[in-house]
Amino acid sequence: MLKDLDTKLDDAATQAQVVGEKVINVLSRPYELAGHVYHSTPSLGITLFDGQKNSIDDLLKQADLAMYQAKAGGRSTMRFFSSEMQTVMLHRIALEADIRKGLVRREFALYFQPQVDVDSHVVGAEALLRWNHPLDGVVTPSGFIGLAEDTGLIRPLGLWVLEEGCHQLERWANDSARSHLTLAINVSAHQFNDARFVDQLLDVLARTGANPNRLKLELTESMLVSNVDEVAAKMFALKARGVGFSLDDFGTGYSSLSYLKRLPLDQLKIDQGFVRDILVDPNDAAIAKMVLALAKSMGLAVIAEGVETQAQREYLYRIGCRAYQGYLYGHPMTIADFELSTASNLAAVQAPQALLPI
Ligand code: C2E
Ligand code: MG
Ligand code: MG
């Protein structure tokens, strides 16, 4: 705690900043421990107070919050607590409580968006999470997934998604017109990195009776950068049971192409960010072509997401893409709407193949 700062807030802040910079400079110097040189990137949070209007706890919370902002701001830096920060924090706390309640009250639902083949026949769906909020109506994931990940709530939420998705697969398995449909489920990094993930999914598969061959997990590149070996081990364990893998938002992350070889992937998903302007932006078109060439050389399938127009679809077809998903074929919708709107457009069910004695 710095005492005897100037009574003018601006000047007090400047004085605190000068001290803060000194602290950061000193802590940033490399230091030696047991013969190894260590570097640290300290983050500093500062809150100014006058008198005893706030409790010690509150002040520490404010400084803590400012420190997290400093971390988010790139480390080796400092931030001052502000009342806007407080507003954001209170909003997050309320939202977190709301998500917990929503789980108990069964306010979450899966929507289904068709995935089609080269003949525009529906071959499967991607499950997309929605929150039927009692006040706000249908909320899309951008409004809550980030916080759910930060707070760990993504684990119960993600488990619910797997459970619900597998139940749906099992229902389709008993419907001769739909037994061939696959279901893609998004899995967040936090969820996949949980040591219990493989067991949990196998347990859900066993309990629901869903066919693992119809299940495709969508992973994102960001989860592969840090611990490829661990991710690969989990993927191989699930792959051995028949579960498939698609790499979502491909091309948007910090791809190290070398990891692709080490993972048992089935499909790359061209991100909608490249599809949007594929007809007008040569860079986007080049990336889409690169994804297709890469997939071909590695024996992987490709699906393009965010396909909105016939022209985009034609272009994708010309460069070799044979599977599509996007508003052109259907928005994400409730299961009732999905089954109704795709009923006349399902891919023909393949006749069961006979095993011939050799
Ligand atoms: P994503 O997996 O890349 O999903 C694609 C997003 O694009 C979805 O947004 C979908 O509604 C939207 N979309 C589909 N077709 C089109 C199109 O033609 N044009 C445009 N402009 N957009 C299209 P949504 O449903 O809001 O989901 C956003 C993200 O939230 C998803 O991105 C996924 O990363 C995440 N998410 C959704 N459901 C789950 C879930 O169950 N678990 C986890 N961990 N993440 C989820
Ligand atoms: Mg996805
Ligand atoms: Mg995507």
Image (cartoon, grey):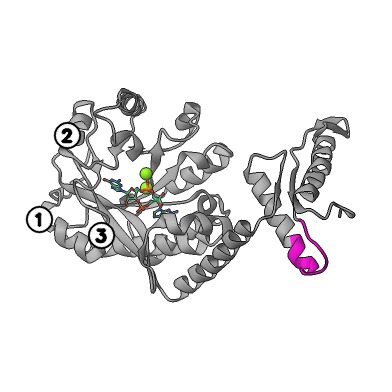
Residue 268 lies left or right of residue 77; in this view the side is left
Q: Position of residue 129 (x, y in %)?
A: 37, 59
Quadrant in the picture for the N terminus: bottom right
Q: Pointer 2: what residue?
A: 311
The Cα–Cα distance between marks 3 and 1, rounded to whole angstroms, is 16 Å
Secondary structure under the numbered disc 1 in the rendered image: helix
Q: Pointer 1: what residue?
A: 344
Q: Pointer 3: what residue?
A: 333
Foreground tag (3 vs 2): 2
Q: Is mark 3 within 8 Å of ligand 1?
A: no
Report the amino acid beneath label 2. Answer: Ala
Query: Residue 93 colored magenta?
Result: no
Q: In front: 57, or 338?
A: 57
Q: Which residues are magenta?
A: 48-60
Q: Position of residue 186 (x, y in %)?
A: 40, 51
Q: Bin the neighbour count of mark 1 within 10 Å (Cα to Cα): few under 14, some 14-19, many 20 and up.
A: few
Q: Give the tally of numbered discs.
A: 3
Report the amino acid beneath label 3. Answer: Met
